[in-house]
Amino acid sequence: MESEQSARDTRSRDEVLRESLERYEAPLVRYALSLTGDLDSARDVVQDTFLRLYQQPPGAVEDHLAQWLFTVGRNRALDVLRKDRRMTPLTDLELDHRPAPEPSPAETAASRDTAGQVEALLTGLPANQREVVRLKFQHHLSYQEIAAVTSLSVGNVGFLLHTALKTLRGRLEKLEQPRPVTHPL
């Protein structure tokens, strides 16, 4: 009888993990990448997050799975960042020799300008504003979920989003304004 219950729990745990991986792995990798800045570290963070999910009792986090995954992922990413601060960074020469994925020329041309401008504008925001913007618009979390992930109040999340969007809107308007042409004499 006990082994039958254990088999049901394991099967249920396996199903929850499989479904969670299908739905949340890619968004979690993107979120972890936005925090760590390194794809390999982001993948490690996500792997640890799903390992911790598997270790949870069946049904323990089902009613708030996205919030739980993003919170655990965020905490693990912050742990990695703390550890990385103590390590020696790569030199420019080492960075030049890292392989990069190559998108097609059409994809590059279509997305480079807009994505580059938006990313540059996002990078110019304070880290806490950047984080809530990414959680809201890249990962589609609610204010309550963002508050739980970041340990901020819902009101603070709303304020940070409002401030970030207002700042981004103003900077985008400046970029779109035509620049006066100057002629040499």
Image (tube, rainbow, N blue to C red):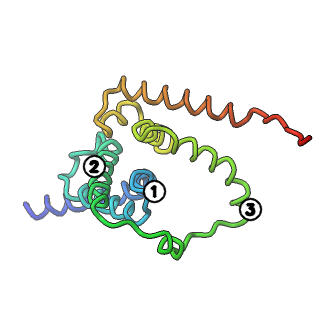
* Image quadrant where one finds the N terminus: bottom left
Residue, far bottom? 97
Residue designated by label 3: 106
Label located before the other in sequence (2 or 1): 1
* Residue 150 percent coordinates (x, y): 32, 38
Q: Look at the numbered disc 2 and give the secondary structure of its residue.
A: helix
State whether residue 98 is above or below residue 78: below
Callout 2 touching callout 1 (CB < 8 Å): no
Dot 2 surroundings within 10 Å: few (below 14), some, or many (20 or more)?
some
In terms of sequence position, does the residue under pointer 2 or pointer 3 come before the other? 2
Q: Residue 97 at what x, y percent from top left?
A: 52, 76
Q: Nearer the viewer, residue 64 or 146?
A: 146
Q: Residue at x 30, y 40 (%)?
A: 64
Question: In the displayed structure, does residue 136 sit left or right of residue 174?
Answer: left
Label 3 vs 1, first from the N-terminus: 1
In this image, 46 relative to 101: left or right?
left
Give the camera-side residue of 178 and 49.
178
Q: Which residue is mark 2?
A: 75
Q: What residue does disc 1 label? A: 26
Q: Is residue 122 above or below residue 163?
A: below
Which image quarter: residue 157?
top left
Which residue does the image show at 89% across and 40% down from the upper left?
Answer: 183
What's the residue at 49%, 26% (across, down)? 162
Q: CA distance from mark 2 to mark 1?
A: 18 Å
Q: Single out the residue that lies furthest toward the left.
A: 2
Is residue 168 among the parts visible in the rendering? yes
Quarter of the image with the C terminus is top right
